[in-house]
Image: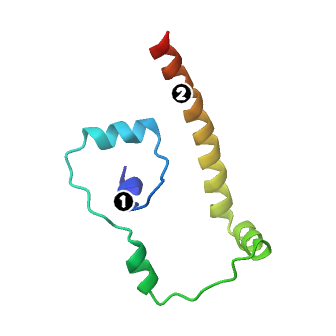
Amino acid sequence: KGEITELTGCDLLTISPGLLGELAASEEPLTQKLNADNAKSLKIAKIGSDEKTFRWLFNEDAMATEKTAEGIRNFAKDIVKLETMVAAALG
């Protein structure tokens, strides 16, 4: 749950049903952690954003590739869970 609360302020975030349940049951206050205006004011060096550079940097970061693959696998599992829940509710 801690990882999700650290992303408070991120729009269009996919959260697993289990974590949604934990968040719904929690009475801890949520404060916005991420803010586009604050991010724009940070003095961070820009990197190339072309596809070739992205793919190179992404593949050089083992954790990025593993976490992305894990996220895709978990997202696929959650789709199956959601389909099962919807089918049960409809029928």
According to the picture, the residue beneath numbered tag 2 turns out to be: 81
At 76% from the left and 71% from the top, the residue drawn is 51
Figure quadrant of residue 42: bottom left
Q: Is residue 55 left or right of residue 69?
A: right
Colouring rule applied to residues: rainbow
Q: Position of residue 67 (x, y in %)?
A: 61, 55
Tell which circle, 1 or 2, labels the residue nearer the N-terminal end: 1
Q: CA distance from mark 1 to mark 2?
A: 25 Å
Mark 2 burial class by Cα count in 10 Å: few <14, some 14-19, many 20+:
some
According to the picture, the residue beneath numbered tag 1 turns out to be: 8
Q: Residue furthest top?
A: 91
Would you place residue 51 above or below residue 78 in this image?
Answer: below
Would you place residue 28 above or below residue 84 in this image?
Answer: below
* In the foreground, 62 or 88: 88
Would you place residue 84 above or below residue 8 in this image?
Answer: above
Q: Position of residue 53 (x, y in %)?
A: 75, 76
Q: Of helix, strand and loop, which one carries label 2? A: helix
At 48% from the left and 14% from the top, the residue drawn is 90
Q: Is residue 35 left or right of residue 70?
A: left
Amino acid type, callout 1: Thr
